[in-house]
Amino acid sequence: MDSLCSDGYRKSEDSGESFKTSVRKDRRGCYKRRRTSETRIKETSSWIDDGHAWRKYGQKPILNSPHPRSYFRCTHKFEQGCPATKHVQKIREDPPKYRTTYFDHHTCRNLYKSSEVIIMDHTAGNNSSNTIWNFQSQIEPDNYEPKDQVKEENKERVQDLPNNKSGSFIPPDHFTTFGQTSGPLTAFSSGSDVISSDVYSCTASTHSMDMDNMIVGTVFDDDFLEY
DNA sequence: GGAATTTGACCACT
DNA sequence: AGTGGTCAAATTCC
């Protein structure tokens, strides 16, 4: 069965027509629970737009949950072999809250959102952590000016971080590295508490970065990040 | 008409 | 046996 399941259904399409249908049906669902890589969980008040193109491939009702769980894979899964998937589930109605679980990292380079500005403006923290960081991703259009997205009164506090490919990100002093997965992912926060061995409560903002120093996840006040 | 979504089926895992 | 992750045909959308 292992040999059949490893990328089997794609290869079967090149086989003979009569063979194709029976093989496809035999292989339905055989990819389940192969999850050995790290996961990242984000809980947000709105549907997450993380800059990647996702294709929905399923939806299931979940036991003891009034809301179904939606399953997404990277749009570029087949053309670029990108393994990234995510599950999204509404966990609260009013105010709405969504839990998004990410599996694997994007290997594709097709961000449709060229860069993002992360604003850390929580009121509970000290002044030193009240900083705006400008994270630039790899693909930038010629006319893109990220500082324009920041409110006028905050512009002086904007600090540009190194481009993903040109340098490495070193968190400032008041940041602490509180999480590291088995993969090349590190999380930084200006304030976090360990709830359990796997779950952290972030009192400020947290940015998870992959091996290219590219933001792969951001959580804000009172969110939880799990590894 | 092609791309994206929906939905029932299949099956690994517990 | 129940649950949840994925496939793929059917349907909808643009």
Image (tube, coloured by chain):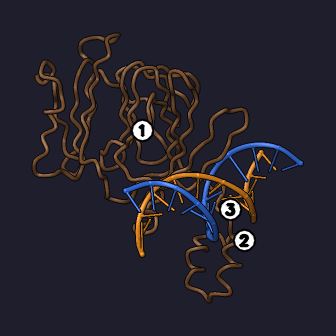
Chain colours: A brown, B orange, C blue
Most foreground residue, A192 or A158: A158
Most foreground residue, A116 or A125: A116
Residue type beneath disc 3 = Gly
Question: Which structural element holds mark 3?
Answer: loop
Q: For the N terminus of chain A, give its image quadrant.
A: bottom right
In the displayed structure, does residue A142 sit left or right of residue A201? left
Mark 2 vs mark 3, foreground winner is 3
Q: Quadrant of residue A127?
A: top left
Q: What distance separates the C-alpha of mark 2 from that of mark 1?
A: 36 Å
Indicate which disc residue A114 carries. Answer: none
Indicate which disc residue A1 carries. Answer: 2
Q: What distance separates the C-alpha of mark 3 from that of mark 1?
A: 27 Å
Residue at 66% over, 74% down: A24
Residue placed under numbered mark 1 in the picture: A48
Residue placed under numbered mark 3 in the picture: A29
Question: Which structural element holds mark 2?
Answer: loop
> Nearer the N terminus, badge 2 or badge 3?
2
Residue at 22% over, 53% down: A139
The image shows residue A213, relative to residue A134, as above or below, that is: below
Q: What distance separates the C-alpha of mark 2 from that of mark 3?
A: 12 Å
In the displayed structure, does residue A6 sit left or right of residue A187? right
Residue type beneath disc 1 = Ile
> Nearer the N terminus, badge 2 or badge 1?
2
Residue at 29% over, 20% down: A174
